[in-house]
Image: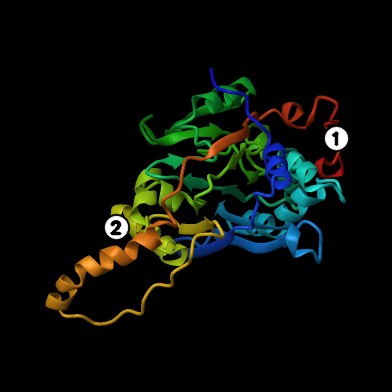
Amino acid sequence: MKPPLVPLATLIGRELRGGKVEKPLVKYGQAALAKKGEDYFLTKPDCERIAGDPSTSFSVFAIFDGHNGISAAIFAKENLLANVLSAIPQGVSRDDWLQALPRALVAGFVKTDIEFQQRGETSGTTMHIGHTGRGVVSLLTVDHRLEENAEERERVTASGGEVGRLNVFGGNEVGPLRCWPGGLCLSRSIGDTDVGEFIVPIPHVKQVKLSNAGGRLIIASDGIWDALPSDVAAQSCRGLPAELAAKLVVKEALRSRGLKDDTTCVVVDIIPSDIPIIPPPPKKKQSFLSSFLSGKKSQSANKATSKLSAVGAVEELFEEGSAVLAERLGKDFPSNQNPGDF
């Protein structure tokens, strides 16, 4: 039987009381190649839970993968974080802040969706996250494409929507499974005012605790994940600094599939304070013979760099993916209330 999940706030509280917590170093890199120009980054490494107090800092990284235009992706980039933070009570302790975060994420996503739909525009956006570990990949979300998710297909049809492929001349069905009306091939997004109530903005939320060795986060859009399995993406950049790693993931996706969609990646390294950061040596032109002779030396030098990606397994603390708002915010939550006001 799987042991019960322990809230992140509880674990951090224990470590704080034991004097075991030191702020890790956060390094990140980003890379992108545009096909339609609908992907947008959000990188904020120096947010503060309490303004003016660096000891309360936290980092936020996201990719907004827009479709049917750029409006929803831009709106979410500019408003989602503020809406999430506004749903957390002011002046609470760190433990209480972490405890409130999963619910605040749901409220923030729903509020952002409501505000965008009031603009009367029809574009939409999704977000993508993945996390790499030592030799394995621990996913922080689930695939909400209807082709891959039977549970989401059942939810859509139970709500009165239809799931099927695009019909072309002659009655032939082509392409991935889609939700009708609207024709979206995914089941959750912000925006998409023209597809009805079957597509919801309620996110899948998962909290994990990294091992003492740190961790690496890979965030990417469909241009990456449609081309590469998550373990291949992780392996393609293992042992490289975050900035170079993001470029290598994009390059590997292009090599595998070509530029068929916006191809966007953010790599974030969470590095414990006791692991030294060794800057990469400047590149020098070498002959084939000198490169061959220096091979053993370079293998030795790479051992320190590989520590950045050689991390232990993550500890799962919280996970909830229900698409029912009452289950996420409470049955006493009025359907006509602004989610950011609770």
Q: Position of residue 24 (x, y in %)?
A: 59, 58
Q: Position of residue 277 (x, y in %)?
A: 48, 67
* Residue 261: image location, x then y, percent: 43, 55
Q: Residue at x 55, y 28 (%)?
A: 152
Say which element carries label 2.
Answer: helix
Q: Quadrant of residue 291?
A: bottom left
Amino acid type of the residue tagged 2 in the rendering = Arg
The total of numbered circles placed on residues is 2
Q: Which residue is mark 2?
A: 255
- Which of disc 1 and disc 2 is earlier in sequence? 2
Front in this rendered view, residue 8 or 23: 23
In the rendered image of this protein, does residue 234 appear above or below residue 35? above
Q: In the image as oriented, which residue stretches furthest toward the top?
A: 1
Q: Quadrant of residue 95?
A: top right
User: In the image, residue 103 lies at what x, y percent?
Assistant: 74, 38
The structure residue drawn at horizontal position 71% and vertical position 37%, both measured from the top left corner, is 10
104 and 126: which is toward the camera: 104
> What element does badge 1 sit on?
loop
Q: Residue at x 71, y 61 (%)?
A: 47
Q: Is residue 229 visible?
A: no
> Dividing the picture into quarters, in which one does residue 181 lie?
top right
Amino acid type at circle 1 is: Asn
* On screen, residue 80 above or below 96: below
Give the numbered dot on residue 336: 1
Task: Kindly report which numbered mark, 2 or 1, lies closer to the viewer in this rendering.
Answer: 2
